[in-house]
Structure formats: C-alpha cells, structure tokens
C-alpha cells in the first residue's frame, strides 16, 4: 500500500471540501422541501438570519451580557483556582487526600447545583456566574498544581536564602515561575465557563444569548434561532482558536 | 495493605468527613430551608427510594442514560477505529469532531429538540452528542499510536478485516477505549440530565427543576447527592481500571 | 539564643553534624556522620570529596536549608536552625536565575526586601553587574545567555546583598575548563573585595588547590572530614598559582587522600548499588 505524501494544506482542503459538500447538501435538501422549515433551515437562510440578528442592538446587548458573565466567572475562577492550587501544593498530605475528588470533579454533574445557586443567590446574573465559577475553577487548580510541581527545586531554595516568607515566596518566585502553565489553565477554563454560562441562561431564560435562543425557539422563529446558534458557534470557535494559539505562544516561554 | 495506603484511605475518609461538616456549617448559616443539611438530605433520599414515583423517574433517566452511553461508546469506538485506520477519512472528518468538542454543545440543544422533538429521543441525543465525539477522537488517537508492526503482522498472517479488528486492533486500543469510557460515562450523564432539566416531563433532571419550582429543597439536594455518589463512584472505579490497564 | 563557644577566629563551626535520610521500605542512608570543622573569618575554604559523599547535603545544613539529624552549626556565635541566617549568601549548582526577570531585575531581586531606596539599589546593582562583567547584558533575560553568564547572574545576585559568608555548591560544574579557570579568578576577586568568608564545594581538586587557603577532604559516605590541607597561598593570588611548585605538592596530597575515598565510593557502587 503506497503512502502518498499528505501535506497539511492538502488535508485541510479535504476537510473544508467535505464541509462545503455537506452545506451544499443541506441547502439542496431544504430547498427541495424534504424537510419542514420549522425543523431545519437552509444554511443560506441561517447566515442571513445571523446577519439580521447581529444588526439588532438588543442582540448585541445579549452577547455583551453573556461575554461579561463569562469573563467575570473566569476571573473569579482564576483567583480562586490559583489560591487553592498554592494552598494544596503547600500541604501535600491534604493534596493527596483531595486527589480522588479532583480526578472525579468533572465527572460530577455540577450543573445540578445550579438550582441551589438560584435559591441562595437569587435570580439574575449571580447564579449563572456561580455555576461558571464552579466549572472553571478546577482546571485552574490543576494547572497551578502541575505548574508548581514543575518549578525547579532550586527556586524554592533561593526564596529561602533570600529569607522570603511563604506569601512573598509565592508571589515573587513561585507564581511567576509557573505563569505559562497557569495561563494555559485559565485559557482552558474560559471554555468551561462558557458552557456553564450558556446552559444556565437556557434554563433561567431572562437575558443573554442563551435566553435569546430559547426565546426564538419558543416563539417558533426557527430561522432566527438558527442564526443566533450560528453566531454563537462562530464566536466560540473564534475564541477557542485564539486561546489555543495564545496557549501555544505562552508555552514557548521567553520574554 | 501497606501502612502508606491505609494512611491514604484514612486521610480521604477524614477529608470526606470534613467536607460533610463544612456542608453542615453552610446549611446552618444559610438556613435549612435554603440548603438542607447532610442528615436531612440522606433521610430524604432514603425516603425517596421507597416511592414508586421517584423510582419511575430514576428508571427513566437510567434507561435514557444507558442507551446514550451505549450509542456514544459504540458509535464513538466505531468512528474512531475508522478514522484512525484510514488517513483520508481521519484527516477529513476528525477536524469536525474537534470543532464539535470545542463548541459548547448546549448551543446545539434547540436544534436537537427541533430534530428529535420533545421526549426521550432528544435526551438520548444530547447524551450521545456529548460523549461520541470525545470517544471517537480518543479511539482514533489510540489506533494511530499503535505500532505499525501490528498491521504488518496481521497482513502477514492474512487476517480478514473483521478478524484483525476483533483480535488485534480492539485489544490493543483497549486502554484508550477505557479511558474514553471514563470520560464518556460523565459526559453522557451530563447530556441526559441537562436534556431532562431543559425539556422533559420525566426523569431526575425534570424532578430537579420541578422540585425547585415548588421550593422542595430537600428533594433537590437528595437528587443531587444521588447523582454525585453515582458519578463519583463510577469515575473512581473506572480510573482504577484505567490505571490497572496502563500497567 | 545561647552563645555557643567558638574558637576566637572561627566564624563558622560544625560540631558533630550527622544527617540521615529515611526512605520507605529501604535502609536508612547516613549521608553525613560526625562532621567537625572550624572555618576562620575571611578564609577561603574549599571542600572536596568523592561523588555522593554528602557535600551538597552539608552545604544545605550549613546554610540553614536543612536540619541536621545530630549536631549543630554555629555561625557568628549563634546556632543555625530552621531559617537561613542573615549575612549568608548561597550559589547553587543548578541554574537558579529567574527567566522571567531581566539580568538587572534578577540581581536586584534580594535588594527589594531590604527597604533601601531606589538610588541605592540601582548603585549596588550596577556595581555588581560591572564587577561580574554583565553590564552590557542588563536588559537581557537569562534564557538568552550562556550557562556561564547565568551563573554569573546568580553570583551577582548574591554579591549585591554583601553577605559575610558565601557558600558555593559546585557553581562551575557545568562550565568548560577555560571558563572555570577564569570564573575562579573572578571568585578570588570577589572574595578579596568583599572580605567575606567563602566556602566552595567542588569536585575538581585542582580548582580547590588553586583557589583555597585550606582544603577539607571528605570521606566516602557517610561523609566526614578526613583531613584539612593548608595551601599557604598569599591573599593576592590568581590562576597563575598553578605554576608554583607547591601547587603540585598540594594537588598530589589531595589526590592521595581522595583517591582512596573515591575507590571506596565506587566500590560500594559496584558491589552494593543503592538507588539514589
């Protein structure tokens, strides 16, 4: 079996071609009337609906709100995650006891706690942000722990030679030393925060992109719904792509 | 059992106890009506397990979950084997899977509902949507990391395709499949649950939302406790299996 | 803290230092046993010994980074315990320069804690950079520099705090021979300029013989001092001391002591391998 050379561009082309073929197929199926317009809408109509929706100030406000919640959740999760990571790293026995919980954390349906947050924090942005924090924090904790593990042992010694107390040592030596790992963990946590925020907005349905989508669904505005979903999907792909490149750059290190 | 291992288990037990105490403290601080305490929750759970209504919901979720898990694993492993073995298929379609994993699948829920309607089919579809792409990607990765000697040996022995898959490929990729199972186990559960919370008339997820609606916090906490125990135990068991397989 | 007795000139005294390492399901390892030593103020003291004899462990204990299992360390009349005493500087074998800071910021690192004003900090850092030949690289970052230069950054970072005792654990181990010799000369300059007491750990006995006033020879594990050899060099020396006929005598003496211990260390490794 001869192996032909697959250049990256060639394989990229295969993927794109296949995608375009699928889109064309969908377009044809919809125009032929084989599918009810209340169920599936032609890709061209999706695109049009997306552009129309994005022109409305209300939609942009929704997107802004959702992004705001994601950013807030990520920021809180980062702070909480770094502090927890530092604490657990300094207490190895406690850390080892926590390990089964950490390993199983993302297996737990944390989302089930969302109603509890609503009851405790009230309705509005707070339970949404809280759910986001719940999901996003652990990836920062894990990244911080891994990063701290990798800090060369000699750095700890230097901190002691300079007689730094534990807080100063963490702030001036340990955290800067594992900044690339921590930033990688934060980039990952953005994705988690996004999922939690959107899902919460679906359920709460009073503001944000999730609400807009549910609203369109409930009022049978199928085209608008698909348009919004497309806009959200593109936004997320863009953000994830950007973050992945950022993580790649950060991992290379250097000033 | 070595001293170190006993100590570890004791530490974990101690930690669990500590977490329970923190839960109790938070309950007291916020008020039992807002956040029921551990004992109250456990009592309610035991009571629920005796009620036929609850057992119906449990069964509904359980069935949907089992089907979703089966489909996600079966479909995922199948696609993974295909994509891992064939360069063309893999490089064409795997990027799609990666995009699917990256997108918050909640985004696609309304579409699923439109396509499958309200009801069990949609729930199962959610679960499959969450689990399948990851399983496929992990399985494909496992196939690709196989040493080429396996394929060559199979061809030398003139094995038929299906024999090759069954007797060489699958066993060799088993560690990756079990690792994928561990993740799919959690994701499929999440998908089914959120599907029930979002748009369903039965199941644990629906019960959760309904209980919130009537301010029945003890039931809410009981269901959450049950789910956490199930997910936590399953995940830990599978983690141990993965470790054992990886040697 | 009670004043412990020390000989008049001794600034650093080790009394009966022992250190054991316990590992689960293995024999305890005695890295050091019964180490006694007095080091005089302003002296340049070198420590040599076979691999695995506990030199680095000893230095960690002297610096206060590690507690001895038995015995005590007395620095300037006070017992060393738990924390690194004021006035002690350490240069480690591994590269300890911080990659996220520039050379200037690395050197200034310790001064930020001292509460000196910015002008004073700047003056001291610039002096140290000049002294170590790093002035042109102040804005560079360590990953951009060679191994030897990174060690110079670490030395400058120590020097800038004006320590009274400087401990160096095989600081030039990763460098080539020529660079080592030149770095040795710089170390001598540093020693004369600061008037500090210097303790240098090295596995290169020619380096020890060339640089030090006295050389302590350690035994194979468990480590203790077998003999201390005085070189008798004048204070104003440099690497040309290798031409002095006494250099050959000193080196020969050191090797005759070290050879036996090295064979012992290796013999043990061959016959009874103990995992590190």
Image (spheres, coloured by chain):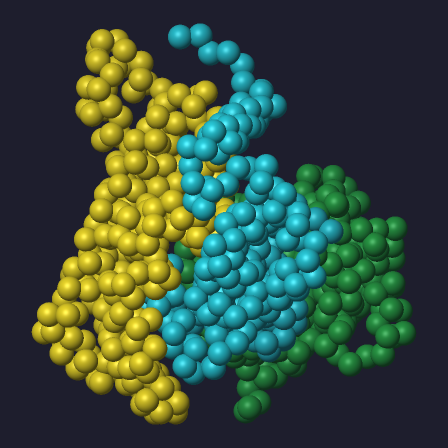
Chain colours: A cyan, B yellow, C green
Name the residue nearer the viewer: B107 or C2: B107
Q: How many marks?
A: 0
Q: Quadrant of residue A2?
A: top left
Q: Would you say residue C41 is visible in this rendering?
A: no
Q: Nearer the viewer, residue A170 or C238?
A: A170
Q: Residue at x 35, y 68 (%)?
A: A112
Quarter holding residue B75: top left
- Give percent across and percent down for residue C82: 52, 78
Q: Position of residue B153 (x, y in %)?
A: 27, 14
- B81 versus B56 height, above or below: above
Query: Whole-percent x and y of residue C191?
Result: 77, 63
Q: Residue at x 59, y 37 (%)?
A: A44
Residue B15 in the figure: left or right of residue B62: right
Q: Decide: is A60 above or below C240.
A: below
Point 18% across, 63% down: residue? B58
Task: State which quarter of the image contains the N terminus of chain A.
Answer: top left
Residue at point 23%, 52% (across, down): B64
Q: Is residue A63 visible?
A: yes
Q: Nearer the viewer, residue A189 or A18?
A: A18
Residue A57 shown left or right of residue B19 in the figure: right
Give the percent coordinates (x, y) of residue B65: 24, 53
Most extreme residue toward the front is A33
The image shows residue B176, relative to residue B158, as above or below, that is: below
């Amino acid at each position: 079996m001869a192996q032909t050379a697959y250049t990256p561009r060639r394989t990229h082309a295969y993927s794109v071609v296949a995608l375009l073929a699928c889109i064309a197929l969908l377009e044809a199926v919809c125009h032929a009337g084989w599918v009810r317009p209340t169920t599936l809408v032609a890709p061209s109509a999706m695109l049009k609906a997306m552009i129309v929706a994005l022109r409305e100030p209300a939609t942009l406000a929704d997107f802004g709100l959702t992004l705001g919640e994601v950013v807030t959740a990520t920021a809180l999760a980062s702070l909480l995650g770094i502090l927890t990571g530092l604490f657990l790293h300094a207490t190895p026995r406690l850390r080892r006891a926590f390990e089964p919980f950490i390993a199983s954390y993302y297996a737990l349906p944390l989302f089930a706690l969302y109603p509890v947050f609503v009851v405790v924090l009230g309705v509005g942005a707070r339970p949404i942000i809280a759910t986001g924090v719940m999901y996003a924090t652990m990836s920062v904790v894990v990244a911080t722990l891994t990063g701290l593990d990798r800090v060369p042992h000699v750095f700890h010694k230097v901190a002691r030679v300079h007689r730094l107390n534990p807080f100063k040592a963490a702030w001036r030596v340990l955290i800067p030393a594992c900044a690339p790992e921590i930033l990688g963990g934060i980039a990952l946590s953005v994705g988690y925060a996004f999922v939690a925020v959107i899902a919460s907005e679906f359920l709460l349905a009073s503001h944000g992109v999730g609400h807009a989508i549910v609203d369109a669904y409930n009022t049978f505005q199928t085209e608008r719904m698909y348009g919004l979903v497309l806009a959200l999907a593109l936004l997320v792909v863009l953000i994830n792509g950007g973050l992945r490149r950022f993580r790649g750059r950060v991992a290379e290190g250097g000033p | 059992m070595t001293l170190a291992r006993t100590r570890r288990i004791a530490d974990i037990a101690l930690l669990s106890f500590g977490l329970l105490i923190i839960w109790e403290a938070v309950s007291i601080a916020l008020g039992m009506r807002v956040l029921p305490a551990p004992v109250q929750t456990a009592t309610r759970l035991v009571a629920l397990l005796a009620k036929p209504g609850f057992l119906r919901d449990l069964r509904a979720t359980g069935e949907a979950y089992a089907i979703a898990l089966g489909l996600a694993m079966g479909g995922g492993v199948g696609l993974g084997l295909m994509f891992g073995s064939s360069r063309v298929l893999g490089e064409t379609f795997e990027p799609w899977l990666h995009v699917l994993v990256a997108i918050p699948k909640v985004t696609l829920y309304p579409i699923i509902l439109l396509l499958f309607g309200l009801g069990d089919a949609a729930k199962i579809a959610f679960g499959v949507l969450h689990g399948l792409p990851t399983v496929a990607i992990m399985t494909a990765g496992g196939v690709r990391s196989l040493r080429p000697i396996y394929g060559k040996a199979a061809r030398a022995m003139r094995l038929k395709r299906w024999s090759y898959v069954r007797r060489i490929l699958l066993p060799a990729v088993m560690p990756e499949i079990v690792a994928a199972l561990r993740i799919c186990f959690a994701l499929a559960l999440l998908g089914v649950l959120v599907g029930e919370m979002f748009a369903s008339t039965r199941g644990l997820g629906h019960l959760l939302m309904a209980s919130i609606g009537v301010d029945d916090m003890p039931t809410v906490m009981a269901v959450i406790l049950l789910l956490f125990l199930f997910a936590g135990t399953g995940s830990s068991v599978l983690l141990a299996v993965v470790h054992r397989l990886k040697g | 803290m009670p004043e412990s007795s020390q000989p008049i000139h001794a600034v650093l005294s080790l009394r009966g230092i022992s250190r054991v390492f316990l590992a689960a399901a293995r024999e305890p390892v005695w890295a050091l046993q019964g180490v006694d030593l007095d080091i005089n103020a302003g002296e340049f003291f070198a420590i040599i010994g076979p691999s695995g004899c506990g030199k680095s462990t000893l230095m960690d204990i002297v610096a206060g980074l590690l507690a001895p299992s038995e015995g005590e360390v007395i620095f300037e009349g006070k017992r060393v315990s738990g924390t690194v005493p004021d006035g002690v500087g350490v240069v480690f074998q591994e590269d300890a320069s911080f990659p996220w800071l520039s050379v200037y910021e690395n050197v200034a690192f310790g001064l930020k804690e001292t509460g000196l004003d910015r002008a004073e900090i700047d003056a001291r850092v610039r002096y140290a950079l000049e002294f170590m030949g790093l002035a042109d690289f102040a804005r560079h970052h360590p990953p951009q520099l060679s191994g030897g230069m990174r060690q110079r950054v670490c030395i400058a970072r120590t020097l800038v705090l004006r320590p009274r005792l400087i401990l160096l654990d095989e600081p030039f181990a990763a460098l080539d021979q020529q660079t080592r010799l030149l770095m040795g000369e710089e170390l001598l300059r540093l020693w004369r300029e600061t008037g500090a007491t210097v303790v240098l750990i090295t596995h290169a006995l020619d380096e020890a013989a060339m640089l030090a006033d006295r050389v302590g020879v350690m035994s194979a594990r468990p480590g203790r001092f077998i003999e201390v050899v005085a070189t008798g060099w004048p204070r104003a020396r440099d690497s040309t001391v290798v031409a002095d006929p006494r250099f050959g005598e000193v080196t020969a003496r050191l090797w005759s002591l070290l050879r036996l211990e090295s064979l012992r260390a290796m013999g043990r490794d061959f016959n009874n391998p103990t995992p590190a």
